[in-house]
Amino acid sequence: MKRIILGLAMLSAATPCFCWGFFAHKKINHYAVFLLPPEMLVLFKPNIDFLSDHATDPDKRRYAVAAEGPRHYIDIDHYGTYPYDSLPRRWQDAVNKYGEDSLAKHGIVPWWVQTMLYRLTEAFKQKDQARILKLSAELGHYMSDLHVPLHASSNHNGQHTGQHGIHGFWESRLPELLADKEWDFFIGKAVYISDPLSFAWKRLLESAAAADTVLRFERELTARFPADQKYAYEERNGVTIRQYSTAFSKAYDSMMKGMVERRMRQSIFATASFWYTAWVNAGQPDLSTLNNQSFSAEDLQEFEWLNNAWKKGTGNGREHESP
């Protein structure tokens, strides 16, 4: 009885669950390192823990910076029907048509990854090691967000269809349950992306096309799954919480024919390829001899600030609660 009461208490104060979840974002950046050429591995491999740990910084920033939220998603269905031709792909064209405030209201992720790519390219040109690592970690986060179907839907957490919690289910519960035991993330090598804007929009439209499947399959499985077996009380970090049961989670993953694993693999490839593209566009600088190899006091203060904001604050933008 005490366990159930504690579980219900945790449910009423559900912990926010973000884009891909902290677990998956860290895994994506980690595995992306191994797709890089030796000339980049000389920097990225020794710093793989930093790249993994700081993959979550953009989510933490949502607790302190109001402008951060829209950088993670886009309500693409706000702009009509697939393939949403009414929305210009180039940022300035979109601003001219809709206005910057309106675009921000509905999300800007496909354009924000272009900003991050430019910043990383400049950091490579300046041979600024600390900035290269910080921007690489964060670019991996936003690039991965492009690959989440519900980041391309106004029904981002099933709130319009009585499926509250599905966002965290898809991007957190399934990777945490299956990634280390059943999924394969060794997928070849990074490639040069000659048209990053078109690449990002292609991935975004793939996500948008999959959003309906994510929602529909969960409804169909719920309709035929024993109601008392959909959720389970399990230990998480020493606390008993209610979450989607292992049986329901695996049945859903099977029903989707590996969609989450596939999108996570594509996130890894895209992240590594954008890192590689920034390095090539910067002239392929020698990464074994870089400037600013230590993080400054300001950098360290920022990392601490982000952690404190995450622990204390309420996120700006969307909140995806775990069940």
Image: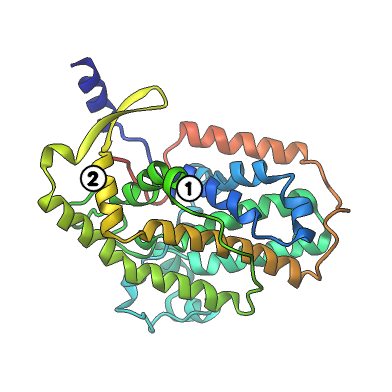
Query: Residue 236 lies in what quarter of the image?
Result: top left
Q: Is residue 18 visible?
A: no
Categorize mark 1 by other alpha carbons within 10 Å: few (<14), some (14-19), many (20+).
many
| Coordinates of residue 167 in the picture (x, y in percent) | 33, 51
Most distant residue in the right direction = 289
Q: Is residue 20 left or right of residue 251?
A: right
Query: Residue 178 lies in what quarter of the image?
Result: top left
Query: Residue 70 lies in what quarter of the image?
Result: bottom left
| Coordinates of residue 173 in the picture (x, y in percent) | 36, 44
What secondary structure is found at the residue carrying circle 1?
A: helix
| Coordinates of residue 148 in the picture (x, y in percent) | 41, 60
| Coordinates of residue 71 in the picture (x, y in percent) | 49, 59
Observer-nearest of 53 and 307? 53
User: Residue 52, relative to residue 111: is it above or below?
Assistant: above
Measured in 3D between alpha carbons, the distance from the residue under mark 2 to the one under mark 1, in whole angstroms, is 20 Å
Q: Is residue 35 left or right of residue 102?
A: right
Q: Is residue 73 left or right of residue 191?
A: left
Foreground mark, 2 or 1, reads 2
Q: What kind of residue is marked 1? A: Ala
Q: Quadrant of the C terminus?
A: top left
Res 138 label = none
Q: Earlier in the sequence, mark 2 or mark 1?
A: 1
Q: Residue at x 36, y 66 (%)?
A: 75
Q: Is residue 272 visible?
A: yes
What secondary structure is found at the residue carrying circle 2?
A: helix
Observer-nearest of 280 and 191? 191
Q: What kind of residue is marked 2? A: Phe
Res 24 label = 1
Categorize mark 2 by other alpha carbons within 10 Å: few (<14), some (14-19), many (20+).
some
Most distant residue in the top direction = 2
Q: Residue at x 75, y 64 (%)?
A: 122
Res 248 label = 2
